[in-house]
Amino acid sequence: MKDYDKIVQDLAPKKFGFWGKIWVTLLCVIAAFAMYAYYQQLSQGLVITHMRDYSLWGVYISNFVFFVAISLVGSLVTAILRLSGANWATPLTRISEVIAVAAIVMAGLTIIIDMGRPERFYNLFIHGRLQSPIIWDVLVITTYLFISLLLLFFPLLPDFSILKKYFKDKPKLSNWYNRLSLKWKGDDRQVKIYNKSIYTLSVLIIPVAFGIHTVTAWLFATTYRPGWDSSNFGPYFIAGAFVAGAGAVVSVMFVLRKAYHLEDYITDFHFDKMGKLLVLLCLVYLYFNVNEYLVPAYKTTEEEADHLKELFVGDYAPMFWIVIVFGLIVPVIALLFKKGRKPLPVFIIGLFVVVGAWWKRYLIVTPTLLHPFLPVEGVPKEWHHYFPTGLEWTITIGTLSGALLIITLLFRYLPVIPIHETIEELEAKHQLKAQKNEK
């Protein structure tokens, strides 16, 4: 079958070219600097950061919340769109699954980085209490990572079988694909188990994904601080996570489309659809932002008023308004127009959304920590201010590079687009066309 051979050839993993090698080298160098910076932090303690009694979380927890938000894309595209029968999303499922796995892995690593004594991590399991939202977060993150890995691996079984034959002239690589395929033959029994497993995982990951963002929001909302003392935080975090995840997908799919020449598979149609979806998600998130700020502004308790003043007209105002305008309002306006939903504009808007999403998490964490209901007495004046040190930035950028490195290396050996599902959809189109011709 000519179409079959072309699809396999187009979608099979390929070696890195010159720019691919440069990209991987750059990410590895950044990661190496970050590891050295973390070694310094580990040997000297958190005292070499700017985190103190006020800003006890700082940039690391902002980064953690960002990674958790990005990871929601796995349930958005892979689960929700798959279950709703949106076949147009097939070329985007693998991209979403890989982003979700990379993000949740780095989210867990970021928590360990934030700990002053990571060697005591085991105490969380030995002495942890179920009354603590921290334990809930650990449990739900672990569960989400496990299901995300399964949801990435299961749809790959037929692809591994195809790649085993495609790379038969490379015995070592073919042997690895053979092992990973778990003896996939595609008979009726295997297909039945395969479809049922993917359906079950798609159903399971939705409540777990909602749970991880809700529990993360509760870590803030159950801490009595102005700006966090809100029952709106759960849906507020979920809405923001959908926006960040969708922005990540459109950014990564554009790069992969260019790098692997997938214009025939990731088409303008997909960017148009994701652009429309991003408009909806941004509008929902804007609604929750209005809720989050309007009610405290109406009540105007002294602490809440100080917090909102810092955001709207104070020290954090430039950052706040840039995030709101360029991270949410401008994307909505631009994507309402068809020209704005072309690949390059959508990619640029996706970058705006992702960068805005990161700084939005920073604004959720830092200003609130610096304005508690009960100020800490007898501390140096500089503790009332916080901005990350160069070491903190190095480690943080290193975690972002680590996530990109995971995505890059996975797509070196995994098909960017599901080969088996693409072939099945092509066969279904041929059958439908034949039936129409018979009539």
Image (cartoon, rainbow, N blue to C red):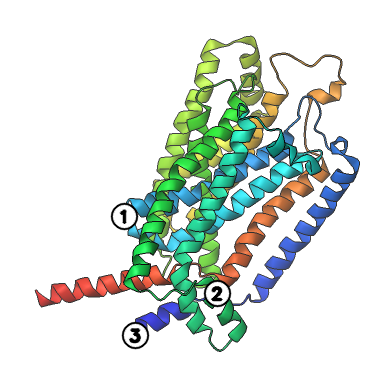
- Compared across the picture, whether 391 is left or right of 153 comes to right
Secondary structure under tag 1 reads loop
Q: Amino acid at mark 3?
A: Met
Residue 158 on image: x %, y % = 43, 71
Q: Earlier in the sequence, mark 2 or mark 3?
A: 3
Which residue lies under the disc numbered 1? 85
Seen in the picture, residue 336 relative to 217 is either above or below; the reply is below
Residue 40 on image: x %, y % = 88, 47
| Mark 3 residue crowding within 10 angstroms, few (<14) / some (14–19) / many (20+) | few
| Mark 1 residue crowding within 10 angstroms, few (<14) / some (14–19) / many (20+) | few
Q: Earlier in the sequence, mark 2 or mark 1?
A: 1
Q: Are marks 2 and 3 in contact (CB under 8 Å)?
A: no
Which residue lies under the disc numbered 3? 1
Real-space Cα distance between discs 1 and 3? 27 Å
Which residue lies under the disc numbered 2? 179
Residue 97 on image: x %, y % = 51, 57
Give the number of the mark in front: 2 or 3.
Answer: 2
